[in-house]
Amino acid sequence: MVTPIKELVVASHNAGKVREIRDLLAPFGVKTYSAQELGLSDVEETGTTFAENAALKAQSAARESGKIALSDDSGLAVNVLDGAPGIHSARWAEQAGSGGRDFALAMAALVEKMRGKEAFKMHNTGAQFICALALALPHSDEKNQEVFVYEGKVEGDIIWPPRGDKGFGYDPIFVAKGDILSFAELEPEIKHAKSHRADAFAKFITAWFGDA
């Protein structure tokens, strides 16, 4: 499926995500709007998977704005925590903070939970960053609204203490397999080329832009 996309809404109020998605779309000449710029509503994430939550946000933004909408739902899944925080990655930061998201406290709480696990004591620090990217076409009828989902993943390990200040979220405690720098220590263009979001984006780009 190759069709021209001239503009779309990035269905997120997270400035870091919006910036990364805009950077990934820049080579294709797509004009982007953020959910905040258009005054779009926040959507309650009631899905049980990254894909379900990404689709919910993209469909809502497309209906509300009348534009094609692209949404990302992503998070950190830690092996010794049975995949937590997973789809609740942002919620962990909200619960840690007082009146807002505090990823510094969330990262500390996550590592403290890991330390209580026997597998962690055996040096099991494995984790994955997972991304589901959903593209929704505008339609007033939710049941007939088309949505397309692309998923990506990057394997790595949790480190402590946090390192770097170039990323966002849990980036300072995640090192991808084969790397020595955390995601937050990488220059944005390097991280964008190897992240879970980039993996999902490669599938999205192939589907909608072909060899453009």
Image: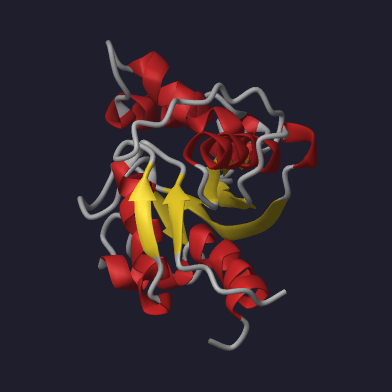
Colour mode?
secondary structure
Q: Nearer the viewer, residue 77 or 135?
A: 135
Quadrant of the image occupied by residue 102? top left
Residue 180 visible in the picture: no
Say above or below: 55 vs 191.
Answer: above
Residue sitting at x 71%, y 29%? 48
Query: Which residue lies most toward the top here?
Result: 98
Residue sitting at x 29%, y 19%? 100
Total of numbered circles in the picture? Answer: 0
On-image quarter of the N terminus: bottom right
In the displayed structure image, the side of residue 12 where residue 135 appears, left or right: right
In the displayed structure image, the side of residue 50 where residue 44 appears, left or right: left
Point out residue 75 in the picture as x, y percentages from the top left corner: 52, 41
Point out residue 86 in the picture as x, y percentages from the top left corner: 59, 35
Say above or below: 39 vs 185.
Answer: above
Say above or below: 62 vs 195.
Answer: above
Point out residue 188 in the picture as x, y percentages from the top left corner: 28, 65
Point out residue 205 in the picture as x, y percentages from the top left corner: 57, 73
Query: Which residue lies most toward the left here?
Result: 165
Say above or below: 198 vs 210.
Answer: above
Residue sitting at x 30%, y 16%? 97
Quadrant of the image occupied by residue 12? top left
Residue sitting at x 57%, y 66%? 199
Residue 167 visible in the picture: yes
Quadrant of the image occupied by residue 209? bottom right
Q: Nearer the viewer, residue 117 or 21?
A: 21
Query: Which residue lies most toward the bottom here?
Result: 211
In the displayed structure image, the side of residue 102 where residue 24 appears, left or right: right
